[in-house]
Image (spheres, rainbow, N blue to C red):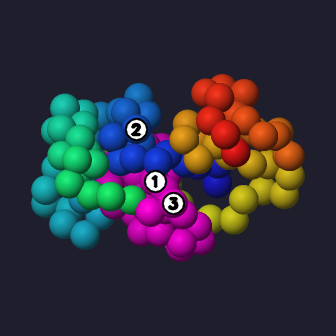
């Protein structure tokens, strides 16, 4: 699975909003979110929560949003409605491929800075 990584839920939600238009909370499927409500909720979450250095959010190709606090297990938070996408329980980086912790772009192995956003790696 080729998921993008992001430092904040807001950044993950912005990308997810380009991939689908409605989500449900993974554990409470009766609560629905459209793009506007997801982005608003993500902004509030980011203002109230401090992430640690090793945690990140993921966006699947289909627009699902997950969280990983230990860089291995994934807690899927938001699932696109009517999705049949296989969502893994953990993430393993592909050999030789690194992702920028800020913008999720692929970086060259051994690079000191992200070529897309300039973040120090």
Q: Which residue is mark 3?
A: 53
Q: Nearer the viewer, residue 45 or 63?
A: 45
Number of residues whose C-alpha sits closer than 10 Å to that of mark 3, classed few (under 14), some (14–19) or many (20 or more): few
Query: Number of numbered discs present?
Result: 3
**Residue at x 39%, y 47% (from the top left corner):** 8
Q: Which mark is residue 117?
A: none
Q: Which mark is residue 11?
A: 2
Tell me the SS state at disc 3: loop
Q: Is residue 38 visible?
A: no
Which is nearer the N-term, disc 1 or disc 2?
A: 2
Q: In the rendered view, does 74 fall on the left or right side of 17?
A: right
Q: In the rendered view, does 82 fall on the left or right side of 73?
A: left
Q: Decide: marks 3, 1 in contact (CB < 8 A)?
A: no
Tell me the CA gap for discs 3 and 1. 12 Å
Which is nearer the N-term, disc 2 or disc 3?
A: 2
**Residue at x 33%, y 40% (from the top left corner):** 10
Q: Nearer the viewer, residue 110 or 17?
A: 110
**Residue at x 46%, y 53% (from the top left corner):** 57
Image quarter of residue 31: bottom left
Where residue 21 sits in the image (x, y, percent)?
30, 34
Tell me the CA gap for discs 1 and 2. 9 Å
Q: In the rendered view, does 80 fall on the left or right side of 90?
A: left
Q: Which mark is residue 57?
A: 1
Above or below, 72 relative to 60: below
Instruction: Tell me the magenta residue range.
Output: 52-80
Q: Is residue 71 magenta?
A: yes
Q: Decide: marks 1, 2 in contact (CB < 8 A)?
A: yes
Position of the C terminus, as image quadrant, is: top right
**Residue at x 39%, y 59% (from the top left corner):** 51
């Amino acid at each position: 699975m080729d998921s993008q990584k992001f430092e904040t839920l807001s950044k993950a939600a912005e990308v997810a909003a380009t991939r689908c238009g409605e989500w449900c909370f993974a554990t409470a499927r009766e609560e629905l979110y459209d793009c506007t409500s997801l982005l608003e909720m993500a902004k509030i979450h980011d203002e109230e929560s401090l992430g640690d250095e090793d945690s990140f959010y993921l966006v699947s190709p289909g627009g699902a949003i997950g969280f990983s606090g230990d860089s291995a297990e994934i807690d899927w938070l938001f699932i696109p409605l009517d999705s049949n996408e296989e969502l893994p329980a953990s993430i393993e980086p592909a050999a030789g491929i690194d992702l920028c912790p800020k913008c999720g772009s692929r970086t060259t192995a051994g690079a000191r800075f992200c070529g897309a956003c300039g973040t120090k790696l």
